[in-house]
Image (cartoon, helix red, strand yellow):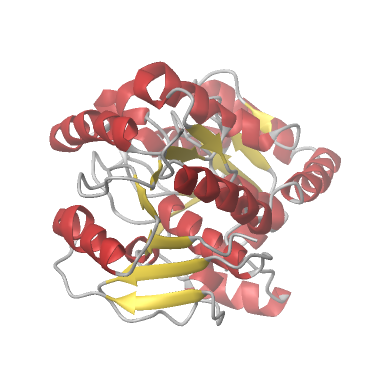
């Protein structure tokens, strides 16, 4: 199956710190290692092979000399993919014009069109110009939710008919710790015994200020973890841990009474599934694909009003039985997503993209 497929992946995208994009690429590769296929997957990067890459002969890590940043994406990666004989080339958002055929791009969301104020001007202009051009050239476009598919096709007419949905799943590094280890890690981080949690890079789209203010009004300590990002520092009394390693994050999910997902918009929302997997009930916003991902397992808020979020926090934390029911629904919901299924669907997309190379008679 897929014996003649040679796929070049931009594996440099796997090496950054915990973000949704990183989780997607790591999850996809782990799924490809756990799926029945005979495709050659060339993992092209300008850094050495990380330890977390599965030991699978179908996954070939190839180090390519080249500068980082946009130079890598536009030139080094595209040229290396051609040199190593790839008939499908898979990147993210913006594909190099050098990729003439068999190009596949993953577009997680088009929030730069939906909420341009959430982006720095340079990033907004760059994305709004290069992503539509990529959609015109790409053989296929992958996105991570039906919501995101609809939005991509609405804002980028050239994408219509090319978009395929392959859902995300729980990051492979999410695992349940022993109670003693989880408590020890939380104590080292200076986390109170009872707390709420929110996770994410500090970007305007993540709307961290809502979680901070709602927790304060509700009278609950809030732990905020993630990278600095950009934008105004939300005022408040939250415990900010900064970036934490995988097991520290596992411990934080495990111990939180509630997880707050206040983003204005998400193309998917992997942390919602991560919270479900580690037994943490979720309150999330209505923006983008969050309701689609949460299903009936989370409390989806109809507004972004601080007082309404604070009331929801107070009501849920006063009802242990309701929280237990949400945990059970979360466990069931997360079982509906797997990286093996993501990989299976992605291989189908690769097959479609490769077929675009064959001239039609």
Decide if residue 311 is in sight here.
Answer: yes
Check the image and report above or below for 251 versus 339: below
Q: Is residue 329 left or right of residue 356?
A: right
Residue 277, how many percent across, how many down? 70, 56
Check the image and report above or below for 345 versus 209: below
Residue toward you, 136 or 198: 136
Decide if residue 221 is in sight here.
Answer: no
Q: Residue at x 42, y 58 (%)?
A: 22
Check the image and report above or below for 269 versus 20: above
Q: Residue at x 36, y 29 (%)?
A: 111
Residue toward you, 217 or 197: 197
Q: Quadrant of the N terminus?
A: bottom right
Residue toward you, 93 or 87: 87
Q: How many marks?
A: 0
Residue 303, how many percent across, how many down? 54, 18
Residue toward you, 87 or 294: 87
Q: Residue at x 45, y 51 (%)?
A: 20
Residue 274, how many percent across, how many down? 62, 54
């Amino acid at each position: 199956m897929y014996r003649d497929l040679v796929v070049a992946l931009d594996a440099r995208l796997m090496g950054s710190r915990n973000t949704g994009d990183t989780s997607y690429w790591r999850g996809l590769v782990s799924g490809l290692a756990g799926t029945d296929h005979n495709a050659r997957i060339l993992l092209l990067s300008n850094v050495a092979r990380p330890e977390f890459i599965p030991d699978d002969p179908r996954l070939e890590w190839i180090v390519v000399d080249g500068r980082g940043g946009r130079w890598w994406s536009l030139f080094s990666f595209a040229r290396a993919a051609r040199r190593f004989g790839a008939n499908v080339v898979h990147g993210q958002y913006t594909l190099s014009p050098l990729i003439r055929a068999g190009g596949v791009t993953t577009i997680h969301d088009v929030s730069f069109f939906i909420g341009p104020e959430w982006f720095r001007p340079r990033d907004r202009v760059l994305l709004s110009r290069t992503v539509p051009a990529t959609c015109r050239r790409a053989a296929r476009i992958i996105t991570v939710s039906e919501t995101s598919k609809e939005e991509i096709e609405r804002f980028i007419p050239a994408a219509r008919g090319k978009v395929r949905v392959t859902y995300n799943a729980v990051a492979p590094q999410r695992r349940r710790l022993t109670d003693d280890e989880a408590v020890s890690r939380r104590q080292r981080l200076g986390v109170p015994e009872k707390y709420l949690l929110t996770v994410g890079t500090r970007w305007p789209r993540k709307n961290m200020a809502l979680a901070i203010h709602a927790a304060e009004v509700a009278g609950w300590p809030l732990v905020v973890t993630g990278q600095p990002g950009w934008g105004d520092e939300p005022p408040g009394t939250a415990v900010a841990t900064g970036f934490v390693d995988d097991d520290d994050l596992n411990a934080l999910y495990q111990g939180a009474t509630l997880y707050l997902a206040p983003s204005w918009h998400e193309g998917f929302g992997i942390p919602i599934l991560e919270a479900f997997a580690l037994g943490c009930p979720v309150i999330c916003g209505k923006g983008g694909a969050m309701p689609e991902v949460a299903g009936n397992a989370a409390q989806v808020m109809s507004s972004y009003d601080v007082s309404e979020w604070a009331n929801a926090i107070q009501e849920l934390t006063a009802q242990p039985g309701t929280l237990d029911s949400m945990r059970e629904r979360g466990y069931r919901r997360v079982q509906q997503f797997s990286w093996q299924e993501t990989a299976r669907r992605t291989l189908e997309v690769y097959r479609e993209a490769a077929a675009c190379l064959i001239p039609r008679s």
